[in-house]
């Protein structure tokens, strides 16, 4: 597999943290899913979110590109307030669907279950969104799609349908598809959880290569070995809140919170 070490993350359009959330709250009915989540993530930082099932990790990830709207708080990615704008009179209103789509185009999202278009070839899956959403010229988008396929080790699969690929190969295509939009930020929601064990390594290798190339990544994962090797910061969530964060080795070796100790005792 060819490494992504030559991949260059896009130049950000603002100074300061690439992600900033301010007291984000989210309810599903009477369940308080996210509670006052405030966080800053620096450019080029690799952050892994861990915690027990139901801790709010995936929901938080989905709020960062407004796949889940929030009930209160503020979210900024690369200097832009996501999904909202503040009017001159101070009132906060939702932005248009078109404006939100433009914001999402700068945030890559890799899901658990690939979500590739089954009626398209692998190559078409990758170049389709840059042409349709960003208005790139098709020839340029196709050329970049082939380059990305080569970098994830799948250049020989360009003309096949996703159903003919293994799960690990499909997930690598999904990563290439997200990268084709040239995002400033990549979000990964347990990208290896749906894979057979022997396929996990090939996906994690692509993510390691991205980390080395300086891509800012926020990853929900239970792959603790990968976390130790790649993460700059480990964030532990429980009951919708961030309860602990820091250098992965320090959190693993000397957790401060009892819930962190309980969780790590089950996964390490």
Image: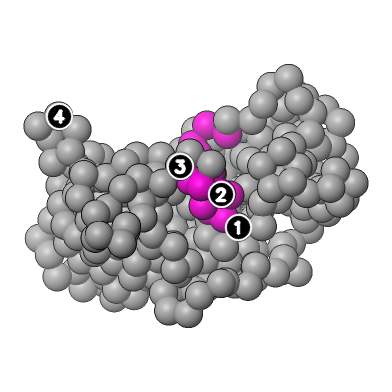
Tell me the colour scheme of the image: one colour
Query: Magenta residues?
Result: 99-114
Q: Which mark is residue 99?
A: none
Question: What separation in Å lies between label 3 and label 1 (alpha carbons)?
Answer: 20 Å
Q: Give the mark toward the camera: 3 or 2.
A: 3
Label 1 CA crowd tier, 10 Å (few <14, some 14–19, many 20+): many
The answer to whether residue 157 is left or right of residue 224 is right
Mark 2–mark 4 CB contact (< 8 Å):
no
Q: Which mark is residue 96?
A: 3
Residue 169 visible to the viewer: no
Q: Give the mark toward the camera: 3 or 1.
A: 3
Q: Closer to the camera, 188 or 204?
A: 188
The residue beneath circle 2 is 102
> Which badge, 4 or 3, comes first in the chain's sequence?
4
Question: What separation in Å lies between label 2 and label 1 (alpha carbons)?
Answer: 11 Å
The residue beneath circle 4 is 29
Measured as percent of width and height from the top left, residue 235 is found at: 30, 63
**Label 1 SS:** loop
In percent of the image, x 66 and y 57: which residue is there? Answer: 182
Q: Give the mark toward the camera: 2 or 1.
A: 2
> Which badge, 2 or 1, comes first in the chain's sequence?
2
Q: Quadrant of the C terminus?
A: bottom left
In percent of the image, x 51 and y 52: which residue is there? Answer: 103
């Amino acid at each position: 597999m060819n490494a992504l070490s030559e991949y260059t993350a896009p130049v950000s359009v603002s100074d300061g943290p690439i992600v900033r959330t301010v007291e984000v709250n989210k309810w599903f009915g009477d369940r308080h899913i996210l509670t006052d989540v405030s966080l800053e993530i620096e450019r080029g930082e690799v952050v892994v979110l861990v915690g027990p099932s139901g801790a709010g990790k995936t929901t938080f990830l989905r709020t960062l590109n407004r796949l889940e709207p929030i009930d209160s708080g503020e979210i900024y990615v690369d200097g832009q307030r996501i999904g909202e704008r503040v009017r001159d009179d101070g009132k906060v209103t939702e932005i248009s669907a078109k404006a939100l789509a433009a914001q999402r185009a700068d945030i890559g999202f890799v899901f658990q279950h690939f979500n590739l278009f089954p009626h398209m070839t692998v190559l078409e899956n990758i170049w389709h969104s840059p042409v349709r959403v960003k208005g790139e010229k098709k020839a340029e988008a196709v050329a970049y799609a082939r380059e990305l396929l080569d970098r994830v080790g799948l250049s020989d699969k360009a003309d096949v349908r996703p159903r003919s690929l293994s799960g690990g190969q499909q997930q690598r295509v999904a990563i290439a598809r997200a990268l084709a939009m040239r995002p400033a930020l990549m979000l990964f929601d347990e990208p290896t959880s749906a894979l057979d064990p022997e396929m996990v390594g090939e996906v994690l290798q692509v993510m390691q290569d991205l980390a080395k190339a300086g891509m800012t990544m926020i990853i929900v994962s239970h792959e603790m070995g990968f976390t130790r090797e790649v993460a700059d910061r480990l964030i532990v969530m429980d009951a919708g809140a961030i309860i602990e964060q820091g250098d992965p080795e320090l959190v693993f070796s000397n957790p401060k919170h009892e819930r962190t100790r309980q969780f790590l005792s089950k996964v390490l």
